[in-house]
Image: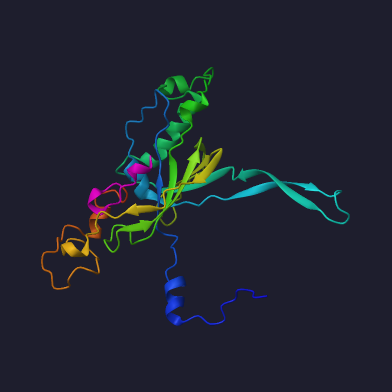
């Protein structure tokens, strides 16, 4: 009986199969406001949250089982009955001063909204008789929190489409904003870590994203940066389509110039 082992693999096959690994530093976190009425955070900037989320984690899950140890002598069987998801997921955001600390204020406002503190004055909140009035879950829970894992070829124009891994979180809301240390010692970038809780997640059926920077080789369009099929001697390259623009008031994930339109995921 053959074990299906491949005893010899050519170097070309090896290179094509394993030398193009996925990288941990290329991803997007897409955060949307909750759907409830009265949530009116005036400084809301989804693009800025995308650009300043410096750390996230792809979630995990496990299968819950029940043991049966009396059906067969000496054998313990395990049968699945449910899927269990992690209780929370953490996101770390770099805080920007020109946004008036929006990364901190937004999630603090979301938590205020949950317990009925939004719109209240300092005098009202400082009252010892102030009472929280919680919102209904449908108002403060969001089904639009997503993590998109992609690779650096997206937007490069090298291929017509690129692979995506889209995690969708259901009934998500911020459960905690972690302590943010400040010190008189050597200055560091201020970061805000937010813990979201959610009921479950699923990986979307969306597996690819069309690259708007790609041009069919038959069109000989040199304005497609990185396209290997474009003649090297072409002189009509559009210098405005450079990757530096991605970081200058352009969203990595909403710019039609680069085909990085993740807005269709919502």
Residue 221 visible to the viewer:
no
Q: Identify the residue shown where x is 40% and y is 22%.
A: 121
Relative image position of residue 28 (x, y in whole percent):
39, 50
Residue 251 visible to the viewer:
yes
Q: Residue most toward the front?
A: 1
User: Looking at the rendering, in which quadrant would you find the C terminus?
Assistant: top left
Q: Is residue 47 above or below residue 153?
A: above
Is residue 32 rendered to the left or right of residue 257?
right
Q: Residue most toward the top?
A: 129
Please give the count of numbered marks on the rendered protein. 0
Is residue 238 rendered to the left or right of residue 125?
left
Relative image position of residue 233 (x, y in whole percent):
13, 73
Is residue 47 rendered to the left or right of residue 29?
left
Q: In this orientation, which residue lies closer to the viewer: 107 or 243?
A: 243
Q: Residue most toward the left?
A: 235
Q: In this orientation, which residue lies closer to the viewer: 169 or 67?
A: 67
Q: Identify the residue shown where x is 78% and y is 48%.
A: 67
Q: Identify the residue shown where x is 21% and y is 61%.
A: 224
User: Looking at the rendering, in which quadrant would you find the N terminus?
Assistant: bottom right
* Coloration of the structure image: rainbow
Q: In this orientation, which residue lies closer to the viewer: 95 or 154?
A: 154
Highlighted range, magenta: 254-266
Q: Is residue 192 magenta?
A: no
Q: Identify the residue shown where x is 29% and y is 46%.
A: 254
Relative image position of residue 77 (x, y in whole percent):
78, 52
Relative image position of residue 86 (x, y in whole percent):
59, 45
Q: In this orientation, which residue lies closer to the viewer: 152 or 230?
A: 230
Is residue 181 rendered to the left or right of residue 71?
left
């Amino acid at each position: 009986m053959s074990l299906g082992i491949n005893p010899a693999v050519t170097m070309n096959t090896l290179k094509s199969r394993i030398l193009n690994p996925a990288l941990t530093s290329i991803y997007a976190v897409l955060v949307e406001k909750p759907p409830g009425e009265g949530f009116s955070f005036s400084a809301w900037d989804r693009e800025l949250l995308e650009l300043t989320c410096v750390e996230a984690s792809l979630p995990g899950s496990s299968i819950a089982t029940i043991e049966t140890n009396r059906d067969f002598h000496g054998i313990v069987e395990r049968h699945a009955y449910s899927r269990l998801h992690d209780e929370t997921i953490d996101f770390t955001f770099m805080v920007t001063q020109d946004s008036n600390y929006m990364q901190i204020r937004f999630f603090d406002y979301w938590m205020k909204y949950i317990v009925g503190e939004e719109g209240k004055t300092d005098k009202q909140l400082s009252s010892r008789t102030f009472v929280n009035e919680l919102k209904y879950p449908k108002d403060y829970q969001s089904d639009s929190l997503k993590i998109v894992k992609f690779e650096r070829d997206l937007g490069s124009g090298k291929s017509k489409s690129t692979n995506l891994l889209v995690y969708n979180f259901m009934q998500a809301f911020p459960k905690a904003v972690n302590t943010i240390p400040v010190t008189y010692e050597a200055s560091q970038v201020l970061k805000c870590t937010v813990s979201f809780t959610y009921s479950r997640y699923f990986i979307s059926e969306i597996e690819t994203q069309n690259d708007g920077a790609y041009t069919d080789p038959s069109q000989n369009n040199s304005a497609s940066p990185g396209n290997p099929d474009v003649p090297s001697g072409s002189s009509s390259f559009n210098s405005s389509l450079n990757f530096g623009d991605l970081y200058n008031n352009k969203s990595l994930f909403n710019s039609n110039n680069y085909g990085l339109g993740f807005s269709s995921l919502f």
